[in-house]
Amino acid sequence: MAAAVVGSSQELAQEIKAFISGVDPVHGNKLPLKEHARCAIVLLWNLPPARNAALDHLRGVFDEYVSGYLVELESESGARPIVGPSLDDIIQEIQSVLSEFIRVNPKVWAPIVSAWSIDLMGQLSSKYAGRHSVPHASSLNELLQLWMSCKATRMLMDSYIQCLSSMISTCPDACVDALLDTSVQHSPHFDWVVAHIGSSFPNTIISRVLSCGLKDFCMHGMAPPDALFPTAADKRIPKIASVVGILGHLASRHSESIKQELLKMFHDSLGLVRDQQQKATVPFLLQLAVMSPMLLSIISAELVDSLKPSVLNQLHQHFATLPREDLENIVSLIVHLISQMSNGAYRILQFLVNTAMPASVITTPGLAVHDGVREACDRIIQLLLLNLQKLVYSRSSATLVDAAPRPVPFLDELKRHIKDLCVETLRLERKRFLWQHQLLGLLSIYCNPSCAPDALFYMMTLAKSQEELSLAAQLYAVLTSSVSNLLPTTIKKCVSQIHSGSISEQHLIQLFGNLALLIQWEESPSSMSSHLALSVSSHLFDFGQLLLHQNPDVSKAVTLLLSVCPLPKAIRPAQLLVIIRSAVHQFFLVLHRKCATGIGYTSKLLARLSGVSSLSVKAILQQLVEGALHRGNIQLFGGSVEAWTWEMNSLEDSNKTSLLDINQRFGTAVNFSGSIWSVFHAGIIGHGLKPCHASQEQEQSEILYNTQKFMSLIIQCCSGGRYHVDPTQLQPHEVLVNPEAAKTVAVVLVELICPDVTNSELAWPPEEHTRNTVERDIQIYKRFKENPLLFQLLYFVGLGRPALCYCSVLLRGLLATLMAHWEGSRDEHTTKSPWHLQASCALVACMGEGYLLPPVLSNMHEIFSQLTPFEVHLLLLSVWEYLKDNSPLPQKFTFNAERGLFFRDFARDGDIGKYLNVLHSVLHKNIDRLGLLSGRLQAYP
Amino acid sequence: MSDIRHSLLRRDALSAAKEVLYHLDIYLSSQLQNASLSVGDKGCTDLLEEFILQVPKERNCQPKRLNSLQELQLLEIMCNYFQEQSKDSVRQVMFSTIFSPQGNKADDSRITLLGKLVSMAVAVCRVPVLECAATWLQRTPAVYCVRLARTLVEDYCSLLPGSIHMLKQIFSTSSRFCCQFITAVTALYDLSSDDLIPPNDLLETVVSWIFEDPRLILIIFLNTPITANLPIGFLELTSITGLIRWCVKAPLAYKRRKKSSLANGATGTKMGKENALGVDNDCHTLYSKLHLSVLQVLILLQVHLTEKNLFGRLGLVLFDHVVSLVEEINRLSEELNPLNVAQEMELSLDRLAQALQVAMASGALLCSRENLRTVCSRLPHNNLLQLVISGPVQQPSHAALPPGFYPHIHTPPLAYPGLPAHPVQTFIPGMTFPYRPIH
């Protein structure tokens, strides 16, 4: 470059003249652009005061070059451009001059050249932004490509980068300052420069940009501007805007470094010795975060980690010196920021709440935060809640007016943590649960359709005690006015959660228990319980399906819930039947399990179900009776298991034989009902005797208990229907049984005990016909023998006159077997075969109760125990005779509207005297013993 | 005046400035002819400030600014004007009217413009401008002079690599300016911090000048009528004090810079270290040379003082400055660990002792040995210094001293700087004294 150094001062003077006038001093013609530029370079080398003028002149050269370049691009013809290449060498020369300067004395030249090149780049990119070959400012990459392929701008960029890299180890602030200034001035068009430099020196640019911004912030006064009007701040602190812009560019690739820098800045500012700049750091960072949600999100996630007690105490110490007004500003800024924070919102909340908690007695010493910190956090939380409340409510009112409500990122983020929030709230820890509860309310209103049900759902699922549950109720009370349809959606949510299987069994139990509690709560706020009950009942079926849950506790809880919730008037029969079946099943399960509360719940549920419709009564009764007679349940009521174990064996055998084989053995395989082959009920030849009774004897008291429970349930169900008369007017000993219900039981009994329908009409055949039905009769007899409950049921049917008529076939079968027994019995006394005696008594009594027999005939069972078997046979025979002549038909009953019951007028059937002859003979024969009773056995017309 | 102003406002900035220069020239010439120079005609200076120095006069009316090219043109015009103005007096008056600080807000741009003008004049060898600037430096408070010097040093020593030769040539073009420049530069670079160590180029230039002609630094002193009281706040008459400070403090100051740069890790590379080492060695040589020159100048000074009948009456090296120099050395030695800098300290104190001895002998420094002893008592021990301050001693066989020269070590000076009314009795045989001591 020595060539550029002018030898004498005269020559230099000549050069100055030429440069100023633009005229060749020798020839007198106008200097061409290139020569003029050379002239400028010479001055740059030789005349310090001309530095600015020369550099300004060179701007023109670059401008010319860029414009030529763009013209060339736009012409698209690839024609030889007019100025472009001819300027290439001068551009090159300029670059080498400048780079020589920077190399020799970077300290002085780097600020000059960097400011010049940056400013020129800004000017050029702004000036040519409108050209159609220049991509729009938003497409950063294309812009970058265009300008970097232009030699002039590339050279400027290279020069700037040279400046920056030569200063990077010492003090690049001057260079970065220029960058910031220009960035403010030419913002959107200049972004490519920032992007390029930023990605070349990410760390330097980030830290320097921040430190320059901080310096600028300090100079403009550190009073934080109004948080809610950041636009006003823009004007006051211009540089911070470009800081935000530049960091915004870098954030996509270097967010990690930015985060590190920001955190480092924060920690550095906490030193013990603090200058003005360090004091301004925290407000500066806050301001940055206000202006750039992106920076906020970068830092928010990590910031909490660094807020250790010691750091907090330091912060407190530093802020303690600030004037009150500034503090207020900072706090409101923080509150604003938190409500705008999305990333890590939950952690921030946790942090605040944890820190704001009043000191507990058990605090780790040394880790304790200062009381002032705690108060500050307390205050921040309260203001935050207030602010959120404002946002949420103004937002919901705004939805009425304009379409786009303002989002609150903090709440948006918390939405995902609603469950955690509920868990936290339910801990009922001092103070904090109040905050969290309030926050839940706000959150629910904020995301209206989705969150409120979620929150309520979690509260109801997770509440373990009534105290905790009351929080859910309070939440409901808060929300009910602003959220419509809250409970139905909540229940819907519960149901969907149940269906998806995402709730553990423990929680299911809690949920159902809580729902039941809430429904039963009489003083619930805003009539929550009735609404809740309605909602639950509309999902009856969904809950009903859980009755058969494998976990007994779950099914118990569901039973409780269903038993307390009102049943809907209209429910699909199919669903109803499913529920009924499940409930009945559940009933027997709890009987097995000896679970008293479960029995109570189930009975209540079934009783209520029976009230739904006549269909339900029938279904329940049918199910109950079927269940009671089910082999597995027989034992519950004192039945023996002999029969079914044997049948199980045969069933297993039959599994081994193929149907084809059986069919081919013609004549043996087919079950000829009533044939001789079927009567070998003592066993099958080749199989040996039937196995003995299974020795599983129930406790007598349990049997009694179970029977009692079962029968009272049946009675409850039967009386559940419409009454014809006010139950309170009944005599104490009378049990009100709905005839329809009783008929159902009767029919079911018949179906179950005697599936064979031949000869099963209601009218009684002559006694001889029993020979045809021996097998069936034995079967019936066996069923009665193995299951004492049947007598109870029969008696119950008898109560519901005239339902017993429908049991004729059973009565007939039983009577026939008993008669056969007594006829063949060679014992002295009937007491020798106690079961038969008892059965005979029960049968006759039952028929009397059912008005199948007139009172005199039915009373005779009282003397059976005093007679010989044959006498009993004779008596039963006369009963048969009576029944044969006066068939037990329902038509014979008439409805007594006064008492609401059916009665039978035996007088209409004519004289019963001839049926009493045998009785009276027996009475006479045993008058010594039975004289006392003769009064009861007289017919009084 | 206001109508001129309004017409000027309509013009573009450059032609307005030219117009103001023109008017100013005419006005001052006529004033000079009338011999009734009223300094600071308000109207003229206002126009000057508004249109040449570009200081806005009215808040709402922003005059057109000169752009950088126009500014360059203006500089050229002014250079040419001063070059072509044949009348010395007009030129001087013009120069001081434009550039003398007025104590108002225009001073900043005034000094900036002056810096550029002088810098340009240096580059294109405009002798009249430099002469005027030399005078300006004499009459202007030191703070402004220092700023001018700084501008020139920045322009020619750090900004433009290889342009120091232009600065060097002012030695031949305007020795007055050159002399004043050295004084200003020594006032500016007092080595009190790393930044205030003179750049190598500057040092080399200054040393080469003085080595070539030691008389250079006395030019102003010789060509100026000496007033009794040196005004405070202005540049000193000579740069001797400053140069002594350079020589004495240099070893320690360079040591300190080396240490701090090592601490900063700036010269991390081996190359850098070697370079710095080489440069520092060169500098040491230069300072030795400079020291020699200073001593020679002091000896010359004795002759001139005698010629001007000022020997013993005018202390060119003020005792106060010696005191502050000693304090600075003390501070430096405290800053550096004395054990590490024993060698440098030895060199410094040797130079100090020599300079003091010669200065006292040549009548440049007027103080008693007693005072000197108290001042120097806190310095680290140095044999030579001990000899100098402890006197009386036998006549030292100092090579630098001409034979037959006896310093006045036996008698304390009777007068102190600033009190020239009290003549100083010195013991120099063969010399006649116009003032007899008063007993």
Image: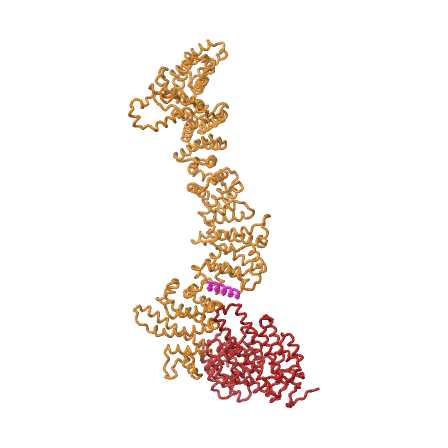
Q: Is A650 on the left or on the right of B342, as rendered? A: left
Task: Based on the picture, tell me whether residue A751 belongs to the magenta stretch.
Answer: no
**Numbered range of the magenta stretch:** A203-219
Question: Above or below — where is A802 with respect to A911?
Answer: below
The colour scheme of the drawn protein is: by chain
Residue at 47 percent of width and 30 percent of height: A591
Q: Colour of chain A?
A: orange
Q: Is B201 on the left or on the right of A67, as rendered? A: right
Front-most of residues A930 and A265: A265
Across and down, in percent, residue A41 comes to: 41, 77
Across and down, in percent, residue A425 comes to: 52, 46
Question: Above or below — where is A854 with respect to A202?
Answer: above
**Residue B384 appears in the figure:** yes
Task: Based on the picture, tell me whether residue A215 belongs to the magenta stretch.
Answer: yes
Q: Chain B is drawn in which colour?
A: red
Residue at 34 percent of width and 74 percent of height: A86
